[in-house]
Image: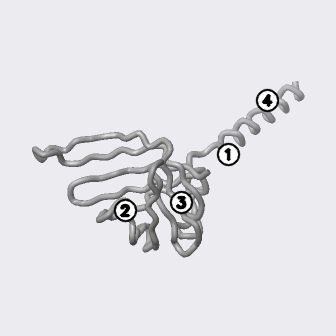
Amino acid sequence: MKTFRFFATLLIITLCAGFTSCSDDDEEENSVEISLANLQGTWDMIKCYGWEYDDNNQKENWTEDVSGEYIFFEDTDGNGGYSDGSHTYYFASSINGNKLILRDSGWLVGKSITITKLTKTELHITATDENSEENYEMIKR
């Protein structure tokens, strides 16, 4: 009987320890500081969606196939580019808080770009102006 109680207690302790180690804050633990050093590399686009006002001033939601598109940051000075598969648009960039500022770019011209998520393997950005919003989800190569 004592052996049964011992193993039952051991089982309960093991289960409790197992459940407490599973948490949904793993994503926060994987987050990294928003910096040019942490952006360095190539980020493949996996999802693009947003909204814009149409000719009748109605908000229209959209999604876009971005397979084969990517952005890259060559160095910690912010030099990089965006490729749509047929053209590459080079840019210089800087970071101000969670804002990504692109200069000399043919991509996302005139938009305010916010980094909404940055981990070692994922990058999400939102580009907005008064008439539209574009959301990009990317994974690191």
Q: CA distance from mark 2 to mark 3?
A: 14 Å
* Residue situated furthest front in the rendering: 86
In this picture, residue 85 sits left or right of residue 9: left
**Is the Cβ of the residue at disc 2 closer than 8 Å to that at disc 3?**
no
Residue at 44% x, 72% y is 97
Query: Which numbered dot is residue 106?
Result: 2
Tag in front: 4 or 2: 2
Label 1 belongs to which residue? 21
Element at label 2: loop
Q: Earlier in the sequence, mark 4 or mark 2?
A: 4
Specify the amino acid type for callout 1: Ser
Residue type for callout 4: Ala
Q: Is residue 6 above or below residue 48?
A: above
> Dot 3: what SS?
strand
Amino acid type, mark 2? Gly
The foreground one among 56 and 92 is: 92
Image location of residue 66, percent across then percent down: 44, 43
- Label 1 – label 4 distance at C-alpha: 20 Å
Tell me the residue at 17%/45% (across/down). Answer: 54
Q: Position of residue 89 (x, y in %)?
A: 43, 61
Residue at point 30%, 53% (across, down): 133
Q: Are marks 1 and 2 in contact (CB under 8 Å)?
A: no
Residue 39: percent from left, percent from top: 55, 63
Whichever of labels 3 and 4 marks the residue nearer the N terminus, that label is 4
> Neighbour class for label 3 at 10 Å: few (<14), some, many (≥20)?
many
Mark carried by residue 8: 4
Q: Secondary structure at mark 4?
A: helix
Q: Which mark is residue 72?
A: 3
Bin the neighbour count of mark 4 within 10 Å (Cα to Cα): few under 14, some 14-19, many 20 and up: few
Indicate the quadrant containing the N terminus: top left, top right, bottom left or bottom right: top right
